[in-house]
Amino acid sequence: MKGKIIKGIAGFYYVHAENGSIYACRAKGIFRKDNQKPLVGDNAEITVLDEKDKEGSLTEILPRKNSLIRPAVANVDQAFVIFAMEDPAPNFLLLDRFLVMMEQAGIPAVICFNKQDLAGGDESGRLAGVYRDCGYQVICASARDGSGLEEIRDTLKGKTTVVAGPSGVGKSSLTNLLQDQVQMETGEISRKLKRGRHTTRHSQVIPVGENTYLMDTPGFSSLYISDMEPDELKGYFREFGKYEGKCRFPGCSHIHEPDCEVKKALEAGEISRLRYDDYLALYDELKEKRRY
């Protein structure tokens, strides 16, 4: 029987099977022998050992579309990153770190600014505009009054979406509002795991509709970009793309060089100062790592 791994903990992998049931499965020893670790989000083959107690054996991991290291998940169609407009105020450097990581992994990212009821309309429009101008889909929402939920549902439909964001931004509140089944499935998994419903130390997949899954991940407060040279970073800032190759010097870093088209665009207001400052901070961080 085929299914999707929706949670892995304490040596058990919980598989949402094609018949709608969730089976607690042990992985066969062949995975350790082949140095293959099952990931949340993996599509898998299982053998049912006990239908009554919903126990099975994980026999095969099907080919992956992609995988991430942080969070450790597989077969992601898109990333849905949630930040609050207020309480807490958005950490844009953290948001841009996440966007760079998704660009590096080739995974489309959608940005959701929650708690728009706490921010003025002008501020909502400004924040959304910064990232829309870069080519990102931006949704302004409020878990409190339900605004933006229909757009979120349309964005998630038919896809496997990794949901991420720092603690306190309303990630769980939005996730639980998307469909009644979210609460039910989360509760069912938690009873199997003997853990509290809101434990978020592990990533998990929540089935919320036909071919529609949410990957709920622990809240993050810090991310560090790795496996990247400083000069690669500019390739992951979308708004720099149309200026590439037009600067005076080949391989321009868009920082110190004269006649840089990106810096000209910045001065003309065509590139966000907020995003450019984050680019500088991340570039310096990568240069420091390279030194050590």
Image (tube, grey):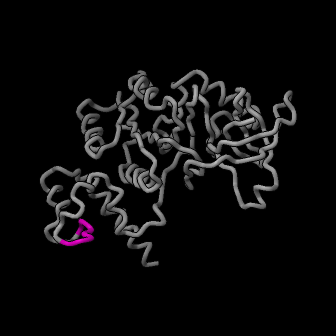
Q: Nearer the viewer, residue 221 or 284?
A: 284
x, y (%) of residue 8? 70, 45
Q: Does residue 189 appear to the left or right of 90 in the view shown?
A: right
Q: Nearer the viewer, residue 234 or 71?
A: 234
Q: From the viewer's perspective, is residue 68 above or below residue 217?
A: below
Which residue is pictured at 51% across the width and 35% down the height? 159
Residue at the bottom extreme?
Answer: 291
Residue 121 spot, x, y in % from top left: 26, 29
Tell me where the magenta segment starts and ends, as one range: 249-255
Left or right of 154? Residue 121 is left
**Secondary structure character of the magenta stretch overall:** loop
99 lies above or below 136: below
| Residue 253 painted magenta | yes
Left or right position of 38 against 151: right
Where in the figure is residue 242, as x and y percent of width and height?
Answer: 23, 54
Residue 283 placement: quadrant: bottom left
| Residue 31 image point, x, y percent | 76, 55
Locate the N terminus and report the quarter of the image it occupies. Answer: top right
Q: Looking at the image, how many numbered discs can be counted on the residues?
A: 0
For the point 27% across and 31% down, which residue is it? 120
Residue 279 located within the stretch drawn in magenta: no
